[in-house]
Image (cartoon, rainbow, N blue to C red):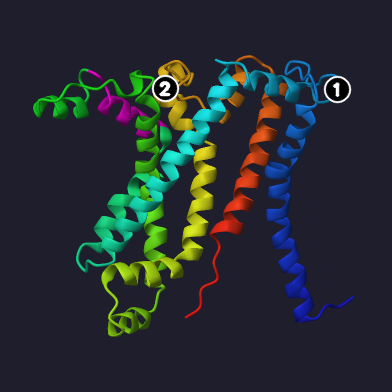
Amino acid sequence: MRLTLRQRQVVWAYIFLSVSLVFFVVIRWYPTILAFNISFRDWNVFEAGGPWVGLQNYQEIWADFFKPRSAVRAAFWNTVRYVVLGVPTQMALGLGIAMLLGQIRRFVGFFRAAYFIPYVTSFVAVAFVWNWLYAPQSGLINQILQAFGLPPQPFTKSPNQALPAITAVAVWRSLGFTVIIFLAGLQQIPDIYYEAARIDGANRWQIFWRVTLPLLNPVIVYLSVLQTISFLRMFDLVQNMSEQGQGGPLKSTTTVVLEVYREGFSSYNMGYAAALTVILFFVILLITIFQLRVLSRRVEY
């Protein structure tokens, strides 16, 4: 059968699309389905299998969650604190810096690169540098504090300061990405809206609140969903900056993903770890749907 030019283009389009489809099925879908299956089993990692136990793993997680000093309870609570502290801070700083960068005309490329470089730096390298900066005795931050007559701080060695300290590093590392996306959104707003607002007598705050912020809504929704998912999956920085990579001190920095790792690859309790993964999956799904419904606004001028 002889195909027309249009039919050959369609066939080649499906062939190229099938490559990405195979990638997603093998790399994304298959592990997800396997995690659901393992979560209902007493999985033995050394025998690659296990008996069906139904909801037993979920019942154990539920029971552990209400124990006073359980790791699971601390992991979920800390993950919520990372999101609450990190997402608003990163969004506010990103928008503020993007608006300032939008005002300058010289060295724009330099500033964009300076803010974006941390984002392409590996988590391990970032953690290594900040562990030195946070060091109680020899760290640069404590040396600066002492130079101003202030007492040195324990930072990641303190149960009260460790989580905010790691959150600050996470915000610093991803700030460049947020700035670039906000800057792109700001540049898409036509100047005619600002000129019309000034002619109507609007001040800077009114222009920001009534023009800039509503027209940035798609960018705000996109970044809030993306950053929330990122903080819900906190792992690399916590493992490399906390006490012995265990989410310490006193479980003050542990997260759900770190608990999944510890249960799965330290305790070899794969069924329990898979059940935690499934719960985190549905938490992320529900929060994402909630954000899309609550934050999305249709703006027309």
Residue 95 vs residue 8: left or right?
A: left
Q: Tell me the SS state at disc 2.
A: loop
Q: Main secondary structure of the magenta part?
A: helix
Question: Residue at 74% of width from left, 62% of height from top?
Answer: 15
User: What is the tally of numbered marks visible in this picture?
Assistant: 2
**Looking at the picture, does residue 61 appear above or below residue 217?**
above
Disc on the earlier residue, 2 or 1: 1
Q: Nearer the viewer, residue 119 or 153?
A: 153
Q: Position of residue 269 (x, y in %)?
A: 69, 17
Q: Residue at x 74, y 25 (%)?
A: 58
- Checking the image for residue 52, the label placed there is 1
Amino acid residing under circle 1: Trp
Of 185 and 151, which appears nearest the observer? 151
In this image, 287 relative to 136: left or right?
Answer: right
Q: Position of residue 207 (x, y in %)?
A: 33, 72
Q: Quadrant of residue 56?
A: top right
Relative to 146, say whether 280 is above or below. below
Residue 204: horizontal and vertical position, in percent?
27, 70
> To which residue does mark 2 refer?
242
Residue type, label 2: Ser
Q: Is residue 127 magenta?
A: yes
Discs 2, 1 touching: Cβ within 8 Å: no
The magenta segment is: 124-136
Element at label 1: loop
| Label 1 neighbour load within 10 Å: few <14, some 14-19, many 20+ | some
Would you identify the image quadrant in which residue 52 lies? top right
For the residues marked 2 and 1, what is the alpha-carbon distance in whole angstroms? 36 Å
Which quadrant of the view contains residue 31?
top right
70 displayed left or right of 251: right
List x then y, in percent, for residue 245. 46, 20
Quadrant for the N terminus in the image: bottom right
Q: From the viewer's perspective, is residue 5 above or below residue 27? A: below
